[in-house]
Image (cartoon, rainbow, N blue to C red):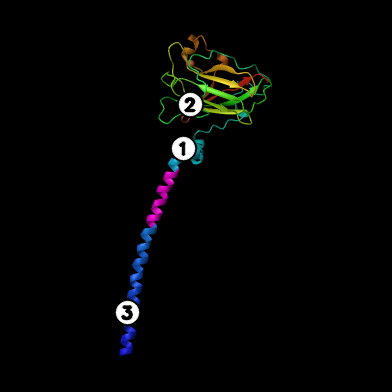
Amino acid sequence: MNRKNIFSLVMTISILALAACAPATAATSPSNDAVNTVVPTTLSNTDSNATSPTSTSSTDSNVTATTEVNITAESMDPNLACSGGKTSSSVTPELTEGPYYKTGSPEQADLYQDGMTGTKLIVTGYVYDTNCQPVANAWLDFWQADANGNYDNSGYTLRGHQFTDENGHFQLTTVVPGLYPGRTEHIHFKVQAPNGEIITSQLFFPGVSQNDSDGIYNANLLLSIQEASDGLQGQYNFVVPVS
Ligand code: FE
């Protein structure tokens, strides 16, 4: 009897001990869940960090997915310089620089900022030489008024420079500029082949009634415009002197 009682007691203690362990194990699970819960928070922090210029890989890929305009030289508007099988072209016409150019613009191809007023515009194209050979690493500097016709003369909003890639390709993301007194819609630019001459001029938009009354307007500098899902898509090919 005593041995049976001792055995029963040992068994009871063992069962109680196991039972006690079970909740302890279960109690660890929520703690693991709690650790897991932290993971999304950490990820979302990573996402927000991804908006910083130093770690934009995921943001860039998102932006690329929605705004990348895949236009090859072959799919350009054939009316543009060096498109449609042309093998030579005149240098892009020069126009006045205007009073609002600022040196030292940041290197940025995307001038569009979230919440910016106006119609989003993506301009793509190439820089060629007069033999219609693409110019890699050409410098392009863009500046323009915002959708209300105002320039940022204290900062660098809607101002930025970039360089063409190895195929002579560029892409500018911005907004359609607004009108200001005496001027039709236009985007100022400078373009220069490596060690070449700087061409200063302006791009224009087709179908703007003020084009005809603007003394600076030049139809050879018209963008080829198409509607895009989130704004407008423009094309233009610059031609610089052979250096
Ligand atoms: Fe202007």
Q: CA distance from mark 2 to mark 1?
A: 19 Å
The location of residue 166, given as percent across then percent down, is: 63, 31
Tell me the residue that label 3 is attached to.
Answer: 12
Q: CA distance from mark 3 to mark 2?
A: 77 Å
In depth, the one of 154 and 40 nearer the eye is 154
In depth, the one of 131 and 232 nearer the eye is 131
Residue at (41%, 54%) from the top-left corner?
36
Identify residue type, mark 1.
Answer: Ser
Identify residue type, mark 3.
Answer: Thr
Q: Earlier in the sequence, mark 1 or mark 3?
A: 3
The location of residue 55, given as percent across then percent down, is: 49, 40
Q: Earlier in the sequence, mark 3 or mark 2?
A: 3
As helix, strand or loop, the secondary structure at mark 1 comes to: loop
Q: Is residue 83 visible?
A: no
Residue at (36%, 59%) from the top-left corner?
30
- Residue 191 sits in which quadrant? top right
Q: Earlier in the sequence, mark 2 or mark 1?
A: 1
Horizontal side of residue 188 vs 27, given as left or right: right
- Quadrant occupied by the N terminus: bottom left
Identify residue type, mark 2.
Answer: Thr
As helix, strand or loop, the secondary structure at mark 2 comes to: strand
- Residue 199 sits in which quadrant? top right
Tell me the residue that label 2 is attached to.
Answer: 174
Tell me the residue that label 1 is attached to.
Answer: 52
Residue range of the region highlighted in magenta in the rendering: 33-46
Secondary structure mostly seen in magenta is helix
- Residue 219 sits in which quadrant? top right
The location of residue 57, given as percent across then percent down, is: 51, 40
Horizontal side of residue 137 vs 123, given as left or right: right
